[in-house]
């Protein structure tokens, strides 16, 4: 019987790469989306056709506890309980420091931190009862120490997600491995569209490997971390950033 994985924000650049990678490796996949219904349904059809695993796209705003509860109940009904959770959903609302406001700040924290908490809490009971579970939180090197005034709220949320990772690992021990992945600059379509050439050049110069990462490289790390080979890795924050200066 395949393990069931719930990936939040699965229609996005990194989320869809994780979904394809895990489906290719025989996991059943629940693809959470918030707004990107068409993309999620397309990915669902692609995964079923190409990898012959069970796959369902399912809508929920992860920041809302009741929507997460309904989503997980639907997954349990259709595919069985969630064995592995990838908290990948995240937002960034870059703006000048003085033009940000508390409402935007709260929204970023709500999605990036409370969303991960809502999902982890909802799936943890089954994980603890069955004495098996893996949770991966996708944080960022911005949560470690590369700071941008335009996204101080994002940076704070990703630092909070690192702290939450440690707390969940303690809370759900000894049967659930909880780890975080901290990507640096990953060249998703959206990320590359958002920057001009000059900015891209200056950003890649800060990376020791002089290139941005590919979403698939993050997906490979996820695949390893949820595998049995990685079963002694717990409560860890793993950077994948090409050796980004300032993030060490
Ligand atoms: P992306 O393409 O924008 O994907 C983010 C996904 O999050 C979107 O598909 C979005 O879904 C989903 N999302 C947003 N709000 C949500 C909500 N309330 N409920 C459920 N889903 C929600 O960005 P990405 O680059 O793939 O990022 C994926 C994760 O990696 C994020 O946590 C991001 O912070 C982190 N990260 C990215 C980079 C990078 O360089 N790309 C670096 C470090 C960390 P809908 O479109 O359906 O609303």
Image: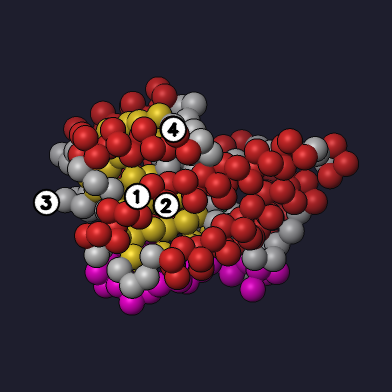
Q: Residue at x 47, y 46 (%)?
A: 118
Disc marking residue 228: none
Closer mark to the observer between disc 1 and disc 3: 1
Q: Residue furthest left?
A: 1
Image: magenta residue range: 222-248
Q: Helix, strand or loop at disc 2?
A: helix
Quote the CA–CA distance across marks 3 and 4.
Answer: 27 Å
Q: Helix, strand or loop at disc 1?
A: helix
Q: Helix, strand or loop at disc 3?
A: loop
Res. 39 in view: yes
**In the rendered structure, which disc, 4 or 1, sits on the residue that comes first in sequence?**
4
Q: Residue furthest bottom?
A: 232
Mark 4 — residue?
Answer: 67
**In the rendered structure, which disc, 2 or 4, sits on the residue that comes first in sequence?**
4
**In the rendered structure, which disc, 2 or 3, sits on the residue that comes first in sequence?**
3
Quote the CA–CA distance across marks 4 and 1.
Answer: 13 Å
């Amino acid at each position: 019987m395949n393990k069931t994985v719930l990936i939040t924000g699965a229609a996005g650049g990194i989320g869809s790469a994780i979904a394809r990678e895990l489906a290719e490796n025989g996991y059943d996949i629940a693809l959470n989306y918030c707004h990107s219904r068409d993309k999620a349904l397309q990915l669902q059809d692609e995964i079923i056709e190409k990898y012959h695993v069970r796959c369902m796209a399912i809508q929920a705003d992860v920041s809302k506890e009741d929507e997460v509860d309904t989503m997980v109940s639907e997954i349990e009904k259709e595919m069985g309980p969630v064995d592995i959770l990838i908290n990948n959903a995240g937002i960034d609302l870059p703006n000048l420091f003085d033009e940000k406001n508390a409402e935007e700040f709260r929204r970023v924290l709500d999605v990036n931190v409370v969303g991960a908490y809502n999902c982890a809490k909802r799936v943890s009971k089954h994980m603890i009862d069955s004495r098996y579970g893996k949770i991966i939180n996708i944080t960022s090197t911005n949560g470690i120490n590369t700071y941008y005034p335009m996204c101080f709220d994002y940076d704070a949320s990703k630092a909070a997600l690192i702290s939450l990772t440690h707390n969940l690992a303690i809370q759900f021990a000894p049967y659930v491995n909880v780890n975080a992945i901290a990507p640096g600059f990953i060249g998703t379509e959206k990320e590359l569209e958002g920057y001009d050439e000059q900015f891209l050049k200056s950003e890649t110069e800060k990376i020791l490997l002089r290139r941005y990462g590919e979403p698939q490289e993050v997906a490979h790390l996820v695949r390893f971390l949820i595998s049995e080979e990685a079963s002694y890795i717990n409560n860890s924050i793993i950077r994948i950033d090409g050796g980004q200066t300032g993030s060490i």
